[in-house]
Image: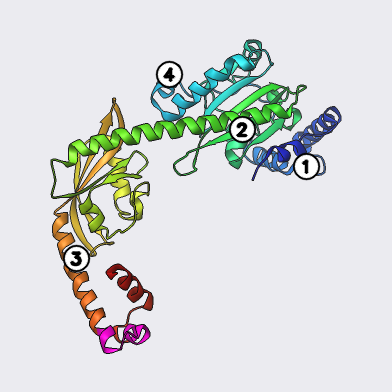
Amino acid sequence: MYTLETIKRTIPHNTHASQFAIANSWERFVGTGQLNHDILRPVIANSWLRCRESFINPFKNRVSRVISEEDIESRLHSEHLGISGKNVLDRMAVSVEGTGHAIILADSAGRILYSVGHSTIRDHLEKINFRPGSDWSEDVAGPNGIGTALALGQPELVLGAEHYCRGWQPWVCYGSPIHNPYNNSILGCVDITGPANKVCIEAMALAMSITQSIETELSVIRLKNREKLRLAYFDIQINYPNEASLIVDEHGYIVDMNSHTSALLNSTSSLINKPIDNFFPNLGSLIDACFLNNTQKECEVELEQVLGGTSRIILKPIMIEGKQSGCFIMIVGGNKIINSFTSLRSKEDDLIRNTLLRTNNNISKAAKILNIDRTTIYRRRKNWQ
């Protein structure tokens, strides 16, 4: 696990002397391609090599703007990352105003969405376009607090001359990736940036703390949205009382289902909060298309987990407060499948019971006669009980 102790070990005791040595290594590498591994941390050395292979300009002093102000405003007020990140950064704005640092929120592609903090520092950072709308992925800007933390998937700092592009070398960046509470995927990054001559471990701790706060807000938003989806599901599914149906959130995780679906999937344990792909692998792309077009879809889908046949599926996107929040899924004729499946299992159970009687409840012999695994018999007997 990446901890503050790990971060502390990356900050040299004699920062000035270390930065001088790194700067000399940078000059040599840029000029000759020779890398001094004794001076550079491995994460920085590897990043420099990738920069050279990608022909990133080491003398770059400004990055490009890739997102319009209109798009940024939309994302800050409609996307979960934007809403949560802006809320947390706004709460932190006053506490960092006089510290000489700025706090940055970026998405998973390294594009800055929002910033708060010391107004003078933010003005200086605008000269290199370190502001909302710009692209700070490592593939574009070389090692930096946003791009490197995203590339590694863990907190990381990039100090002064460790930046491959000379334009960012006056700065120190403390980056911490934001993880999706649903599936631990990376949603974005928090970065705290300040002058390279003001290195402090507290800034790294703050970046990690802000990340955790955003992840907590994301969890709260998810909980509220799932409750809204459950209410929406109740209103829809009462119109189809005899059909197997369920509802998933925008990430494809099951939010709720009726008893017909539980029977269809032969589940004795809760399927809530599990990915729909676990049970219907063919549905994932169809749900994505349903979200993309915001239209109801009807299609034939293979139900391999049930009978190996096909069934008619109806997918209906769910809008809550003007935003696509989930998808209602109905398996047309699901009850017929359930009845067929139940009848088949009942016949199988009768056959197992009769074979156990013939073998005096010797499970090994019964399994051999039926050519099935012993665990199948153990599982069926448990269900009988």
Residue 72 visible in this rendered orientation of the protein: yes
Q: CA distance from mark 4 to mark 2?
A: 25 Å
Q: Position of residue 20 (x, y in %)?
A: 84, 29
Decide: is 30 above or below 265. above
Label 3 vs label 2, nearer the camera: 3
Label 1 or label 4, whichever comes before in sequence order = 1
Q: Residue at x 70, y 27 (%)?
A: 202
| C-beta proximity under 8 Å, tags 3 and 2 | no
Residue 138 seen in render: no
Q: Which residue is mark 2?
A: 208
First in sequence: mark 4 or mark 2?
A: 4
| Residue 358 is covered by the magenta coloring | yes
Residue at the image point whose x is 53% and y is 18% from the top: 90
Q: CA distance from mark 1 to mark 4?
A: 43 Å
For disc 4, the marked residue is 73
- The quadrant of the picture occupied by the C terminus is bottom left
Of circles 1 and 3, which is in front? 3
Mark 2 and mark 1: Cα distance apart in space:
31 Å
Sequence order check, earlier mark of 3 and 4: 4
Q: In this image, 138 relative to 299: left or right?
A: right
Which residue bears the numbered disc 1? 35
Residue type, numbered disc 2 = Met
- Identify the secondary structure beneath mark 3: helix
How would you rate the neighbour count of disc 1 (Cα within 10 Å): few for under 14, some for 14-19, many for 20 or more?
some
Q: Which residue is the site of mark 3?
A: 342
Q: Position of residue 185 (x, y in %)?
A: 49, 42
In the image, is residue 63 above or below residue 255?
above
